[in-house]
Amino acid sequence: MSSSWLQYLQSAKKTALVQDGRKKVHYSFSDGTEMAEEYDLKDSQLLVRKWRKKTTLGAAGKWDFEVGEDLQSTSLEQTLLKESSSNPIFIRKDTADSFQWRVRNIPYPVETYDVTVDQEQRCCIIRTTNKKYYKKFTIPDIDRLKLPLEQSAISKAHANNTLIISYSKPSEVLKMEKDVRQELLKLKASKDGDMECKPS
């Protein structure tokens, strides 16, 4: 299971760049899909994973963030159209041993939230007892390894208007992440300012 995901990553053309205290890895797959990851140089923690597919016209599509968030400065047009800053913001930020999601701008006490696993739909669902928030989300890493979702793996906390949901990583995921890090050690990374970053 993990080997098929590893083989998929190995099949891609890869480039790596060290910049701003991060190792940035770009994957180009044969079907035109791209993936970009960013790892903290100090502890090798994954900070960003995003995907991009070609549009029907063959142009590069918009980046879709699986882990982390888009911190790029927004254009005036995007700023005018962006959601209210008081709306809940849902992002994934993992730790070494857990998948973790944060819902910002959500003030209700921790007992308001119910987080359940839906085995049929292979997703997790956040509900509030006051009916103010509902969110359904998947765990792509679990899906890629075809592992079952476990209700017992979920925990929750709330602080500073932020709901924090953690899902303990199964041993298969931890092994896969270790194998991927081993692969990335073989990839020569150019430093920021180098002229060229050749695919592996």
Image: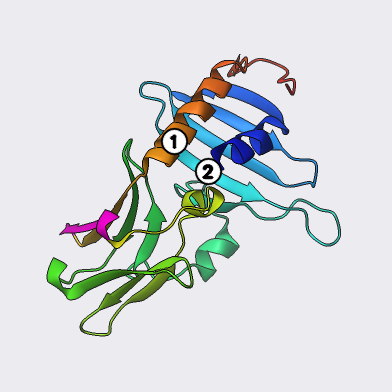
6 displayed left or right of 153: right
**Residue at horizontal 52%, vertical 21%?**
182
Question: Relative to 40, does residue 187 appear above or below in the rendering?
Answer: above
Using the image as rendered, state which of residue 20 and residue 130 is in the foreground: 130
Q: Main secondary structure of the magenta part?
A: strand
Residue 127, position as x, y percentages in the image: 29, 76
Q: Quadrant of the N terminus?
A: top right
Name which residue type carries label 1: Leu
* x 19%, y 69%: residue: 107
The magenta-colored residue range is: 152-160
**Rendered position, 98 above or below 101:** above
- Crowd tier of the residue under label 1, counting other residues whose Cα lies within 10 Å: few below 14, some 14–19, many 20 or above: many
Q: How many marks?
A: 2
Q: Secondary structure at mark 1?
A: strand
SS type, badge 2: strand
> Is residue 174 found inside the magenta-colored segment of the image?
no
Residue drawn 45% across the image and 28% down it: 178
Name the residue that disc number 2 marks: 49
Q: Which residue is mark 1?
A: 46
Q: Is residue 36 left or right of residue 169?
A: right
Residue 183 point in image, percent of width and height = 57, 22
Residue located 73% across and 18% down the image: 196
Q: Are marks 2 and 1 in contact (CB under 8 Å)?
A: yes
Across and down, in percent, residue 116 comes to 31, 69
Q: Nearer the viewer, residue 132 or 124?
A: 124
Q: Splitting the image into 4 quarters, where does residue 117 fall?
A: bottom left
Return the x and y of residue 163 as percentages of the image width and height.
24, 61
Q: Quadrant of the C terminus?
A: top right
Q: Amino acid at mark 2?
A: Arg
